Image: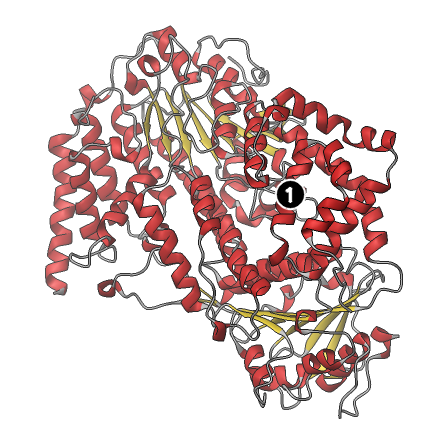
């Protein structure tokens, strides 16, 4: 039995290699002609709702060793970022990508009401769909890639994939019958997910505009490779954010999009009420953010011309004034007091700006970084960045 | 001492009919929803609703207009006054939806807070006058939790006094609990129950395991336990029933958490009688709400303990609350991503405990128990908090309203003296023990 499992694992590793060698786009095709877009921007939401006191307050530093020791010294840190909108994930992230506070359905059943950075970027620069991606662990972010406005939306929206939702649907399918290997066999689950990529993606809430009903070959190959990397990783990852991480890496490697929003969301496990799981998720997010930046530095298409912005979309309730770390519904100061870290191209190194900023400043800042225009909104570009 | 509700919902609403007609529609809806829950309210909740209406009624017309003006303006802006629903719950849902759609929900919430900031002191003065009885909250970390002595009670220890303990023979969980609380016949719970005017809702046990429940039952002659008890372990079958219902609903497809919450509200499943120390309609509804309204309460034992304890503090206002945390299980890879799912018979993975994570959780959650108690006038300035850990030779005692030193008190106390202190604090019979209460705490 062990030998069979082992040999099957080898076969899967072989399949990964096959996918990489035969299915993935050749380097010449992997880097689409983007002479007109020199810069790259990656926004990572340190997402799910995280409190100042559990991150950048001194007592929170042990939870974010990579941010504190590796990334902040390389970039510009704003300790006073604020979010004044509704304290739900979709509206808070909608404010990040539009530069305007949003008040739409909290569970993602409505698109944002103002143009997103993805639409403005693609429309102005006449870019193909694969130039802008949203890779989100939050299952309700399917409509985050484009607004509901006439003349905007799908034709110029970002591609959106929801890795965790894909994982959850696959698990649901695996445990829906007593037959078959279930979820305890990682390789079987990997096979199931790779097969599922061929069966269409709409059921997972994805919106991949390039490829219509079937995933485009390049995209499909990238995702298949990332799945196999995830399941074969020696750290034995199991979380949705880790799958988001692997898929982001692969999309960056193979498709080199200019604008990427990565939404991590494991931290929202805080709703389970176990403080240790919440802290564990913060530490994992810290590790994944660092890993993504390292990955970007390893890729010629990103190294030296990429600006990374890391920001929580919102906080969580404070202890004395709110309902504690489990929730984010009180709208108290702890829900609104955030931080933002920028690093990479155009960002001064090792500085802290005490100037209060807002999360609605992210969208116009991205517009400045990538050189496109946003309609006037509530945010202002971060003037400390040199573009 | 119980606050007796001398009226029922219908007569309360009748008495304040004219007043209610002048109040903002969202406030009226709130009153209506609370009144509809009357059969499932604890006595303090009924008293609260009465005091709330009496306090508003005591305001002059201009005072009332001033207090509610901003709320009424926001309602008008959102179109809440046009809602014709007569059922209070529907009225509440529809007006909330309008406030949300109009984008004024956060401002409306602020206004509600402002109204209650003004009302609360008046309500508290009616319900909790000076001289109201003392209360006791005991938090226990169960055996198996990986206690880090240097971090133990780190959020609370500076608020009280660290008291070394002589455990003597009480090093096991059972012996420790027996030494602190006594057994069924002569224990603390029985002593409080026997005191004049008390009933089983005056003493609560909320625990992850069932050791305190067993203690309450030991030697019980069938007359029923002296405390209200909720045990996550004993409620396992009930939890599984609820989880199965929710999971089936999730699999059948729901549009979002709101629909799932509405479905959960409509679930009519009661905990089996034998899973509770004592059972009545109010308590059964409480348990059901604790599992369905709390975040993660169906999934994590200590989350349930904290949530249920805090709800008990807020709703039942017991004079004695014993909270006992335990060791929670680790999340299972992958399958824990599916909320409420059950492992397949062919997928049985051994349950692994997380003793260290449980310690981190218990530290935060015990802080929340204290914090929430102190938010209530029923407890503020009237409560002794004891933080204990089974097998650990120290405790922290916090006397509400008294400045804490964080310093050690010497010499070490015996567990019998701790037990005597609890009885003396509550003013109940000292029982057969000759131990003396700790003068620094009860004096």
Q: Nearer the viewer, residue A66 or B2?
A: B2
Relative to B409, B219 lies left or right: left
Q: Nearer the viewer, residue B322 or A278?
A: B322
- Please indicate, yes or no, whether residue A323 appears anywhere in the rendered image: no
For the point 68% across and 60% down, which residue is it?
B313
Relative to B431, A281 lies left or right: left
Q: How is the image coloured?
A: secondary structure
For the point 30% across and 61% down, which residue is it?
B343
Q: Nearer the viewer, residue A225 or B177?
A: B177
Relative to A60, A204 lies left or right: left
Which quadrant is the C terminus of chain B positioned in?
bottom right
Residue A301, image x and y in percent? 32, 22
Placement of B228 over or under A208, stated as above or below: below
Q: Secondary structure at mark 1?
A: helix
**Residue B182 in which image quadrant:** bottom right
Residue B351, image x and y in percent? 36, 67
**Residue A25 in which image quadrant:** top left
Residue A220, image x and y in percent? 19, 31
- Please indicate, yes or no, whether residue B201 appears anywhere in the rendered image: yes
Q: Give the letter of the chain under mark 1.
A: B
Residue B396, image x and y in percent? 73, 70
Placement of A99 over or under B148, stated as above or below: above
Placement of A341 over or under A150, stated as above or below: below
Which quadrant is the N terminus of chain B positioned in?
bottom right
For the point 42% across and 22% down, which residue is it?
A111
Residue tagged by mark 1? Answer: B32
Count the labels in the image: 1
For the point 25% across and 62% down, which residue is it?
B347
């Amino acid at each position: 039995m062990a030998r069979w499992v082992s040999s099957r694992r080898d076969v899967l590793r072989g399949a990964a290699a096959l996918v990489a060698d035969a299915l993935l786009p050749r380097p010449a095709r992997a880097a689409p002609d983007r002479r007109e877009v020199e810069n790259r921007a990656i926004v990572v939401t340190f997402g799910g709702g995280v409190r100042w006191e559990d991150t950048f307050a001194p007592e929170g530093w042990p939870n974010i060793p990579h941010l504190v020791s590796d990334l902040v010294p390389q970039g510009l840190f704003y300790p006073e970022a604020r979010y004044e909108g509704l304290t739900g994930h979709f509206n808070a992230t909608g404010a990040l990508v539009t530069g305007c506070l949003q008040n739409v359905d909290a569970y993602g059943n409505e698109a944002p009401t103002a143009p997103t950075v993805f639409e403005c970027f693609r429309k102005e620069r006449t870019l193909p769909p694969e130039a802008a991606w949203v890779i989100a662990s939050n299952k309700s972010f399917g409509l985050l890639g484009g607004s509901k406005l006439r003349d905007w939306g799908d034709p110029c929206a970002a591609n959106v994939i929801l890795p965790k939702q894909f994982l959850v649907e696959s698990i649901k399918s695996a445990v829906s019958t007593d037959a078959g290997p279930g979820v305890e066999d990682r390789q079987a689950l990997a096979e199931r997910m790779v097969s599922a990529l061929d069966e269409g993606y709409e059921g997972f809430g994805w919106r991949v505009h390039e490829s219509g009903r079937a995933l485009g070959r390049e995209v499909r190959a990238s995702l298949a490779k990332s799945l196999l990397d995830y399941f074969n990783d020696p750290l034995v990852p199991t979380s949705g954010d880790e799958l988001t991480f692997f898929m982001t890496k692969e999309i960056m490697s193979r498709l080199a999009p200019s604008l990427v929003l990565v939404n991590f969301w494991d931290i929202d496990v805080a709703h389970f009420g176990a403080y240790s799981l919440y802290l564990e998720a913060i530490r994992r997010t810290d590790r994944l953010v660092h890993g993504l930046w390292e990955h970007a530095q390893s890729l010629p298409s990103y190294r030296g011309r990429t600006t990374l912005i890391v920001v929580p979309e919102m906080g969580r309730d404070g202890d004395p004034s709110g309902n504690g770390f489990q929730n984010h519904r009180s709208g108290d100061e702890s829900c609104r007091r955030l931080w933002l870290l920028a690093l990479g191209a155009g960002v001064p190194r090792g500085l802290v700006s005490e100037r209060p900023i807002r999360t609605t400043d992210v969208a116009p800042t991205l517009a400045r970084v990538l050189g496109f225009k946003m309609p006037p909104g509530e945010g202002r570009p971060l003037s400390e960045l040199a573009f | 001492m119980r606050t007796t509700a001398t009226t029922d919902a219908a007569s309360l609403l009748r008495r304040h009919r004219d007043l209610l007609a002048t109040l903002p529609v969202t406030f009226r809806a709130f009153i209506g929803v609370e009144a509809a829950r009357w059969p499932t309210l604890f006595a303090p909740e009924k008293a609260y609703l009465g005091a709330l209406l009496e306090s508003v009624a005591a305001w002059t017309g201009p005072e009332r207009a001033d207090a509610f003006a901003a709320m009424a303006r926001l309602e008008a802006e959102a179109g809440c006054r046009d809602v014709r629903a007569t059922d209070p719950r529907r009225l509440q849902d529809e007006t909330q939806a309008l406030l949300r759609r109009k984008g004024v929900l956060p401002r409306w919430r602020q206004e509600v807070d402002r109204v209650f900031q003004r009302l609360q002191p008046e309500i508290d003065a009616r319900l909790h006058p000076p001289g109201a009885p003392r209360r006791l909250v005991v938090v226990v970390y169960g055996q198996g939790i990986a206690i880090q002595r240097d971090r133990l009670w780190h959020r609370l220890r500076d608020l009280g006094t660290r008291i070394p303990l002589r455990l003597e023979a009480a090093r096991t969980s059972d012996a420790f609990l027996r030494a602190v609380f006594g057994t069924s016949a002569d224990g603390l719970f029985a002593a409080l129950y026997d005191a004049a005017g008390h009933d089983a809702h005056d003493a609560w046990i909320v625990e992850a395991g069932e050791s305190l429940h067993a203690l309450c039952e030991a030697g019980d002659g069938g007359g029923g336990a002296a405390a209200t008890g909720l045990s996550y372990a004993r409620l396992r079958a009930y939890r599984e029933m609820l989880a199965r219902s929710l999971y089936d609903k999730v699999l059948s497809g729901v549009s979002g958490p709101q629909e799932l919450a509405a479905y959960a509200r409509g679930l009519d499943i009661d905990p089996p009688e034998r899973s509770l120390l004592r059972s009545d309609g109010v308590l059964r509804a409480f348990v059901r709400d604790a599992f369905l309204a709390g975040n993660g309460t169906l999934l994590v034992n200590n989350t349930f303990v904290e949530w249920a304890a805090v709800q008990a503090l807020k709703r039942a206002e017991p004079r004695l609350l014993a909270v006992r945390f335990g060791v929670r299980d680790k999340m299972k890879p992958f399958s824990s991503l599916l909320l409420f799912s059950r492992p397949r018979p062919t997928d049985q993975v051994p349950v692994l405990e997380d003793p260290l994570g449980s310690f981190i959780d218990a530290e935060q959650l015990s802080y929340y128990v204290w914090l929430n108690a102190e938010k209530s006038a029923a407890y503020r300035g009237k409560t002794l908090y004891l933080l204990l850990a089974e097998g650990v030779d120290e405790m922290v005692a916090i006397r509400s309203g008294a400045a804490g030193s964080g310093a050690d008190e010497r010499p070490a106390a015996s567990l019998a003296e701790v037990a005597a202190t609890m009885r003396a604090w509550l003013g109940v019979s000292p029982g057969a023990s000759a131990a003396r209460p700790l003068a620094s705490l009860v004096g």
